[in-house]
Amino acid sequence: MNITIKDVAREAGVSISTVSKVLNDGSSISDATKEYVRNIMEELGYQPNEQARNFARKKTNNIIYIVLLEEHIAFKNPHMFEIMCGVQNALSKKKYNLSFLGVASGEALSRIQDITGRKSADGIIVHGSVTTREIAEYLSASGFPHIIIGRPPFKCTACWIDINNSISGEMAAKHLTECGCRKIAFIGGPKGDEISTKRLNGFQSAMYNIGYRVSGKYIKYGDNSKESGYRLAMELFEETEQPDGIICENNYIALGVVKAMNAIKKRIPEDIKLISFDDYPLSRIIEPCLTVVDIDVYDMGYQAGDILFRKIKNPELNVQSYTTLPRIIVRNSTGKKTM
């Protein structure tokens, strides 16, 4: 037998509206009455219909996390899922559900317009893989609660959260110079890649401030793959004056660099010191283990979920900020170990 709100009201000797206010934690009901009615609910085994309650309150208690989904995306963008775990943790504490929506390239805007038009969620988290100027402008104009993962590479008034990748590049440069390197190369991703560009700028800025010049021949652009890392490292090793330190944009590039160094019998870290970014997926299994500038994307996801919850409560809230600072994890590839 299903216990209804009427059964609870009759057993407690109160009106149905009082029970309803208790369910919604109404401020007009005393704490003593709330406790009494809730005890009756427990005794009767009453389970409120959350879907009906949310409908009445015009809420879904659902957040949609929208990302680009294509073949091998888990290898191309492993951060995506770590971020999602952080978001889920933050939202679950607020009794919100998180729905994952993968879209093909070019269809994100129409899907977002459908979600906001039908109000099938209380908020949207937009991964940087699908962010466009049109999406940012639409979200800003609509006033729909949202946050974008990753600072958009254009001016906008949309809410976003990001890691400060320029600082990451600075940290990598400072660590290598502290290890005695003076001729440091940077092997990055595509020339127009936002993250790679910011890390490169941070590296160059740090070197300039320290007083070291970075030769243009030490800056290499590729495609974020092991093959690209190998090819670009071999180009560096053909130079008359070879680097004594290399910053790799990611672990896949670093894997290719290590392969190149093994091929020409260069030793790590004795001949060349190596540093990369992010403590996964390969940093701990590459030999020697990589020193990395670790980016806490889980925490960024958690903060994104928390900000979105606050924006749902206060639609006027506008947040554009960087999150947790990265940290250096020192391992054998730079000649030092963490304790």
Image (cartoon, grey):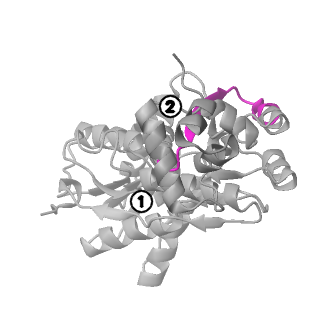
Quick one: SS at disc 2? loop
Q: Is residue 82 left or right of residue 130?
A: left
Q: Nearer the viewer, mark 2 or mark 1?
A: 2
Residue 82: % across, % down: 44, 42
Quick one: SS at disc 1? strand
Classify mark 2: residues with Cα within 10 Å, few (<14), some (14-19) or many (20+).
some
Mark sitting earlier along the chain (2/1): 2
Q: Is residue 207 left or right of residue 60?
A: left
Above or below — where is 151 with respect to 9? Answer: below
The single residue placed furthest to the top in the displayed view is 1
Above or below — where is 233 with respect to 120? Answer: below
Residue range in magenta is 92-111
Q: CA distance from mark 2 to mark 1?
A: 66 Å
Classify mark 1: residues with Cα within 10 Å, few (<14), some (14-19) or many (20+).
many
User: In the rendered structure, which amino acid carries the disc numbered 1?
Assistant: Ala
The residue sitting at 75% across, 39% down in the picture is: 56
The residue sitting at 41% across, 82% down in the picture is: 210
The residue sitting at 68% across, 59% down in the picture is: 313
Residue 326: % across, % down: 40, 63
Q: Is residue 339 visible?
A: yes
Q: Is residue 216 visible?
A: no
Position of the C terminus by quadrant: bottom left
Q: Which residue is mark 2?
A: 46
The reply to whether the magenta stretch includes residue 192 is no
User: In the rendered structure, which amino acid carries the disc numbered 2?
Assistant: Tyr
Q: Which residue is mark 1?
A: 185
The answer to the question of whether label 2 and label 1 lie on touching residues, with beta carbons closer than 8 A, is no
Residue 38: % across, % down: 48, 45
